[in-house]
């Protein structure tokens, strides 16, 4: 039986790896997701057949409740709320690892015998990583949901306090390794770890939540792998290692896309860069220049006679749920002979792949979606770039202003297009809190209003031409 269980874990691991590979492209992502789900089902069944399982009553009850909640959330949660749901899922994974490690500690601790050091270290590592993931993910989800302020929360001595908490957790773990039968000390270990998770995330601003979500996803995988070592479950070790590795790779990709340092992410406090005096003066000069507004009728005329149109979606598109309208507009332009492409920045929206999933929901063809490296050379030959709710990812200050917080961040080269139409509610700055030079460019026209309403007006006008 044991051999069959281990074989099942191996099959599940293979399905996870193939599923991850399939997730790398929108056209195969759904199939990859299904493969991974089948792998997880096999792993769950194999674990249920393990001889160490005493009673299935609570397991079945938890499975039914969890499956019902998961199905409800998958269907009820809006696409704009998907990032915070992912954050919560990361937290649930960390919390589960914390509970399993705590239960194993309670089972193994004996007043008359020392716990083996290897077992103790894995338990305390699982507690630390699981607790940090749980509390940190709760804060990240709260910021994304805006029940907690998205602004960085900073105070004097913050890094020193974080270091002291980390050292305190290590010290308590060492003390428990020597004398494990100290429940109060173990509770303190859990408490300090939870506080550390909160303090590591609160100094991070809302603009950098995509990076945080990726990092916490990696933490949840590491917590699961640690728990696998605690209970001797090879399937959990493999699964956790895959999630941890893929999460840290994605974190590195996101850091590069946002011009962030991974070290700053790990130690917290990034994303709170003050705007330099020179950059502030630059913003004043831009504001004095003013912007050029355009009506829906004129914008429709510009688009209808364009041969090449590049759509640049951002979080504003997701908020207004305008993905179906943008697809309808694109189809109308294509019928008039235009070539329409979509430029997807790695951090467009609030999580990796947010725009891809949103546009896929509206049945936008996969071959019309292009990432930043593919689409940037196209802007020089673009007649009209239609920017819908995007801000920081199209700000030329990332190339032109060394004093800008965005300096060095890879952006979409929208400013190189022949004409630019920006759809936005107002002139409020993006998450970075700086003025966007693109909006003040002479070839840029601003179409103010809700994206969904504005797109519907454009559709009506284009049909009339």
Image: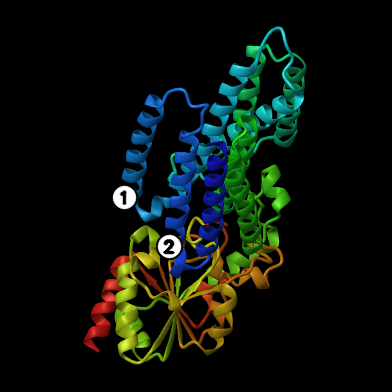
* Residue that carries the numbered disc 1 in the rendered image: 75
Where residue 181 appears, as percent x and y from the top left, is 68, 11
Question: Dividing the image into 4 quarters, which one contains the C terminus?
Answer: bottom left
Crowding at label 2, few (<14), some or many (≥20) Cα neighbours within 10 Å?
some
Where residue 16 appears, as percent x and y from the top left, is 53, 54
Crowding at label 1, few (<14), some or many (≥20) Cα neighbours within 10 Å?
few
Choose between 358 and 230: the one closer to the eye: 230
Residue drawn at 54 percent across, 58 percent down: 20
Residue drawn at 27 percent across, 84 percent down: 462
**Residue 250 appears in the picture as rendered:** yes
Q: Quadrant of residue 275?
A: bottom right
Asked if residue 415 is positioned above or below residue 127 in the image, the reply reads below
Residue drawn at 30 percent across, 71 percent down: 325
SS assignment at label 2: helix
Choose between 16 and 431: the one closer to the eye: 16
Choose between 421 and 353: the one closer to the eye: 353
Residue 376 in the figure: left or right of residue 155 = left
Q: Are marks 1 and 2 in contact (CB under 8 Å)?
A: no
Residue 168 in the figure: left or right of residue 192 = right
**Residue 426 appears in the picture as rendered:** no
Asked if residue 2 is positioned above or below residue 316 in the image, the reply reads above
Q: Quadrant of residue 436?
A: bottom right
Where residue 247 appears, as percent x and y from the top left, is 60, 52
Residue 122 in the figure: left or right of residue 134 = right
Q: CA distance from mark 1 to mark 2?
A: 18 Å
Q: Nearer the viewer, mark 1 or mark 2?
A: 2
Q: Earlier in the sequence, mark 1 or mark 2?
A: 2
Q: Quadrant of residue 203?
A: top right
Choose between 428 and 346: the one closer to the eye: 346
* Residue that carries the numbered disc 2 in the rendered image: 31
Residue drawn at 57 percent across, 60 percent down: 434
SS assignment at label 1: helix
């Amino acid at each position: 039986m044991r051999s069959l269980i281990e074989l099942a874990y191996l099959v599940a691991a293979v399905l996870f790896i193939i599923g991850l590979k399939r997730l790398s492209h929108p056209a195969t992502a759904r199939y990859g997701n299904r493969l991974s789900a089948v792998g997880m089902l096999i792993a769950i069944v194999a674990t249920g057949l393990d001889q160490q399982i005493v009673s299935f009553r609570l397991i079945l009850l938890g499975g039914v409740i969890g499956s019902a909640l998961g199905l409800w959330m998958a269907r009820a949660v809006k696409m704009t709320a998907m990032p915070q749901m992912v954050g919560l899922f990361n937290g649930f994974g960390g919390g589960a690892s914390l509970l399993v490690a705590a239960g194993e500690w309670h089972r193994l601790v004996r007043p008359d015998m020392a716990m083996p050091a290897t077992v103790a270290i894995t338990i305390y590592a699982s507690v630390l990583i699981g607790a940090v993931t749980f509390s940190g993910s709760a804060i990240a989800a709260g910021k994304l949901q805006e029940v907690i302020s998205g602004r960085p929360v900073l105070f004097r001595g913050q890094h020193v306090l974080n270091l002291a908490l980390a050292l305190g957790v290590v010290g308590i773990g060492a003390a428990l390794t020597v004398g494990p039968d100290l429940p109060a000390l173990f509770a303190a270990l859990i408490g300090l770890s939870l506080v550390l998770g909160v303090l590591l995330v609160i100094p991070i601003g809302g603009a950098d939540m995509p990076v945080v979500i990726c990092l916490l996803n990696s933490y949840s995988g590491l917590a699961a792998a640690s728990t696998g070592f605690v209970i001797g479950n090879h399937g959990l070790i493999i699964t956790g290692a895959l999630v941890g590795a893929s999460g840290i790779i994605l974190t590195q990709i996101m850091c590069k896309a946002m011009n962030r340092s991974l070290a700053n992410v790990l130690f917290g406090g990034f994303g709170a860069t003050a705007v330099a005096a020179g950059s502030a003066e630059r913003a004043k000069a831009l504001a004095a220049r003013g912007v050029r507004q355009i009506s829906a009728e004129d914008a429709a005329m510009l688009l209808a006679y364009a041969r090449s149109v590049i759509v640049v979606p951002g979080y504003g598109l997701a908020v207004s749920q305008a993905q179906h309208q943008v697809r309808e507009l694109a189809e109308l332009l294509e019928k008039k002979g235009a070539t329409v492409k979509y430029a997807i920045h790695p951090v467009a929206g609030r999580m990796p792949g947010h725009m891809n999933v949103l546009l896929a929901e509206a049945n936008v063809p996969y071959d019309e979606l292009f990432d930043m490296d593919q689409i940037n050379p196209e802007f020089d030959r673009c007649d009209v770039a239609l920017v819908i709710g995007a801000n920081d990812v199209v700000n030329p200050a990332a190339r032109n202003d060394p004093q800008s917080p965005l300096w060095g961040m890879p952006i979409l080269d929208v400013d190189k297009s022949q004409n630019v139409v920006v759809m936005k509610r107002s002139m409020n700055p993006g998450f970075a809190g700086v003025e966007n030079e693109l909006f003040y460019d002479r070839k840029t026209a601003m179409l103010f209003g809700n994206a969904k309403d504005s797109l519907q007006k454009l559709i009506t006008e284009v049909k009339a031409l």
